[in-house]
Amino acid sequence: MAKTAAEKKKPTAKAAAPAKKTAAKSSPSTPISVPEAPPAVPGAKKVHVHYLTRVEGHGNIVVDVEADGTVSTCRWEVPEAPRFFEAMLVGRDYRDVHHIVSRICGICAIGHQLASLQATEDALNIHVSEQTHILRRLALHAENMQSHLLHIAYLVLPDLMGVDSVLALAQTHKDAVLKFIAARRVSNEFSRIICGRTTHPQRMTPGGFMQFPDTEGLVNLRTMLTQSLPNLEFAVDFFAGIMDRFPHFERDTEYVGLVSPAEYAMYWGEIGSTRDERRPVRQYRNMTREYIIPTSTAKWTKNQTDSYMVGALARFNLNAEHLRPMAGAAAQRMGV
Amino acid sequence: MAKPKIAFFDFAGCEGDQLQIANLEERLLDILDHVEVVSFREVATRHSDDYDVAFVEGSITRPEDEIRLREIRKNAKVLVALGACAAIGGINCLKNFLAENVYREEVYGNSARWFPTYAARPLKSVVHVDAEIPGCPIDPNEFARITKELLLGRDPWIPDFPVCVECKMAGNICRYEMGRMCLGIITRAGCNAACVSEGAHCWGCRGLVPGANLDAARIVMDRAGSDRKATQDLLRFFLGDTGAAL
């Protein structure tokens, strides 16, 4: 059986938080994992985590440490079953494409739909109205709110609190958990009002929307969002109070994300990088530069340095100057 | 009496159905009063092979997944297919209409041989499935209801009439009246005609309604004026593992 990661010190490893107690699951069906035989040399250690928990998607961590403490292997594997979306789309009607790629991910379905719609509209020279832009940005904000709350409260917080899951925290920190849940409920209602639902929304189409939120819905949304601010401030304060529990980890990283002169870029802009020049979105392939390795069904990418990061942290590092005052104050409280 | 033990697993899918369960928000805590979650990789660290009910999301798309699924089937008293990918194959079956070497090379080029895969299929093609929670994504309320019925030892009921019934109840204008197509005519209800109500049409994500009249459906769709390819594309969206898609 593979060992737990809990008490192992990894001197040079680029590993996850040392406080994480990830139980290694027995999984006889993962052929790209390291064989389970005990290390031949006494003193050598092996860490093999099958299906890392509390992440979205399937990943393994494989670490081999020699008897003298040298890390000889430190590898991230992605054993997730490939579904071949790129091939599925060939020959489909342009109005179907975003509904298909939505199914790439249930958590960031809105993001996939919006990227797809922009690509379709660019290909067919379709220009959308300002109203559509506003509604799409709102949909993106709804998704970000939902996804980020899921991440910090359900996926990361258990690590910081040294517990198994948010379900356990619901017993010990019920008040806080209920506040996080309430904020998530608002974010899901936000998606429902704007585009139909959080996961695989139905209303969006190339050129705009098949159905619009009504005035009453939007007024209710504004009230709901305003009323949720105390819960969100609570979340900021809660995490600001436990920032010292985040492991200290720095690595030379290129951060890649949308940038814009006018706003905290999320919907559109140019492709920015902390280590490379800006590029128009159409040149995305010069930035994604995908390659394939045998231990990962997901493709890899590399640009100016070994480590390449996209997502919320990259967006922040590239766009922080455009944060609104309340968000900027929250960032300051967190010490970022 | 000990609380029933439940576990969650996923194969080839988007994890949207597990998210929908998290989206039960406060109701999830209520459900947890009545069950013990012994494995739920997405939100919890713990794992145990001792569970009564297994909820499984995602399709089976490669030989190694069959092995893992059979083990789950062995451990569970009740196996529930969670969502369209698990219950009916879902969107993953779209690739089945391409030649395998074509889709493998399209995505992985010369490296395709590194990644085993075969035609996507629902769980029931591999093991016996006791119940299903349909939809893409599932409806959280339906999940709560079916889980409750399972815990009470009942055979969960899911609607056996088409989406048209719920569409009429919702007061929607029929898509065919608008010159569009819609699979509500052959799709299992239970979603309150959500997609039609949101301005779209039904794609059939909940699977064929029992006794679906596919011949009549094809006549209706031909009369709606769409070409054969559009009809076929719509039928293949989610129903790729059924005769409807041929």
Image (cartoon, coloured by chain):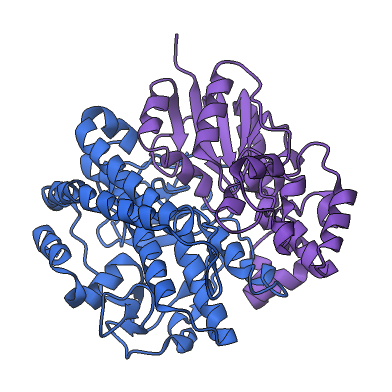
Chain colours: A blue, B purple
Vertical comparison of B211 with B37: above or below? below
The quadrant of the rendering that contains the N terminus of chain B is top left
The quadrant of the rendering that contains the C terminus of chain B is bottom right
Q: Residue furthest top?
A: B1
Image coordinates of residue B162 in percent, x first then y, are 73, 41
Residue at 43% across, 20% down: B34
Residue at 49% across, 60% down: A109
The front one of B199 and A78 is: B199
The front one of B210 and A49 is: B210
The front one of B81 and A245 is: B81
For this view, does A278 lie left or right of residue A238? right
For this view, does A19 lie left or right of residue B177? left
Number of marks present in the image shown: 0
Image coordinates of residue A226 in percent, x first then y, are 21, 53
Say whether residue A223 is visible.
Answer: yes
Vertical comparison of A118 with A198: above or below? below
Residue at 54% across, 62% down: A102
Image coordinates of residue B99 in percent, x first then y, are 80, 68
Say whether residue A26 is visible.
Answer: no
Residue at 55% across, 58% down: A202
Question: To which quarter of the image does residue A178 belong?
Answer: top left
For this view, does A118 lie left or right of residue B134? left
Image coordinates of residue B188 in percent, x first then y, are 71, 40
